[in-house]
Image (spheres, grey):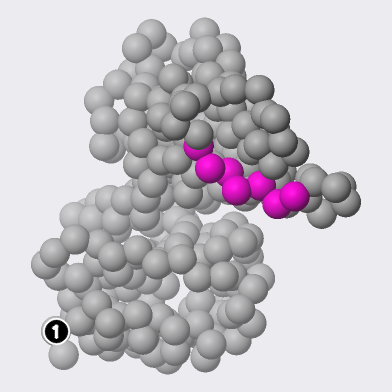
Amino acid sequence: MTRSGLLLLDVGNTTIKLGVLPPQGSMAAYSLPTQHFATSDALGLQVAEICRREGLVPEAVEAWAVSSVVPQLEPTLVAAAERYCRCPVLFAPTDLPLSLNNRYERPQEVGADRLVTAYAATRLYDAPGFIVIDFGTATTFDCVAGKDYLGGLICPGILSSASALSSRTAKLPQATLRVDPTGLHVGRSTSASLNQGLVYGFAAMAEGLVERLKLLLPANSLVVATGGFAGRLAPVCRAFDHVRPDLLLEGLRLAYQDRQAGA
């Protein structure tokens, strides 16, 4: 059987984002709850079903290209790929090298997701430096100068912050995180106050930190926002130059193509 197609997996603590890249056509993205995949069969069956839904025979997949911050799940990924797709799992950055110089004090401490999104920004845009903001379980700010990954900041995530407020404070409702089209206003209900505080608070945090970080980076550095909340926040946040919700999956695709070109 001719191998074609590629699976891209962003394995996080809360969700697994899966990108199905067929031989022709655009990528289809799915989001799966990480905690549901305690066994390789549970994961493999779900992935195989998604492949078929996208018209891709599971056994024809070339490889799974993976960024993972959940080490205990990695053997499950390998077993699922071997049984259901009969293909290898390539982890970034070990199996999928990234053309970045990791300047972290202890390079092994940097999460693969942070490196892959930083690498993706350098491949997709032409600029002397970058700030990549990822609105995930945590909100991370990663800084790049030239081909040097410098490190960054780790801040609370908007969804985890909203959940913590609601679960620890009896009188606070669950936040909708809806962006009000009329802009910032004084909340006249608990729900509106909570929503305005979270949405505009995180927008202001991004603007303030970007302003300060740019002083440490080359002039004309670009800000690239990614993660599930980036698109929703973009209309009320002046800090973003580009919004790429699937930046990590794009980085995995580019890293795999680089590996194949150099093979």
Residue at 69% over, 42% down: 191
Secondary element type, mark 1: loop
Residue at 53% over, 19% down: 207
With 71 as the anchor, is 97 left or right in this view? left
Task: State the residue position of label 1.
Answer: 2
Report if residue 177 lies within the magenta region.
yes
x, y percentage for residue 25?
13, 64
Q: What predominant SS class does the magenta segment belong to?
A: loop
x, y percentage for residue 39?
60, 86
Q: In this view, does 252 lie above or below 132?
A: below
With 27 as the anchor, is 82 left or right in this view? right
Residue at 50% over, 70% down: 32
x, y percentage for residue 21?
25, 66
* Range drawn in magenta: 173-179
Which image quarter is the N terminus in? bottom left
**Callout 1, which amino acid?**
Thr
Q: In this view, does 30 lie above or below 222?
A: below
Tell me if I can see residue 100 in this picture. no
Residue at 36% over, 86% down: 49
Tell me if I can see residue 188 in this picture. yes
| Most distant residue in the front direction | 188
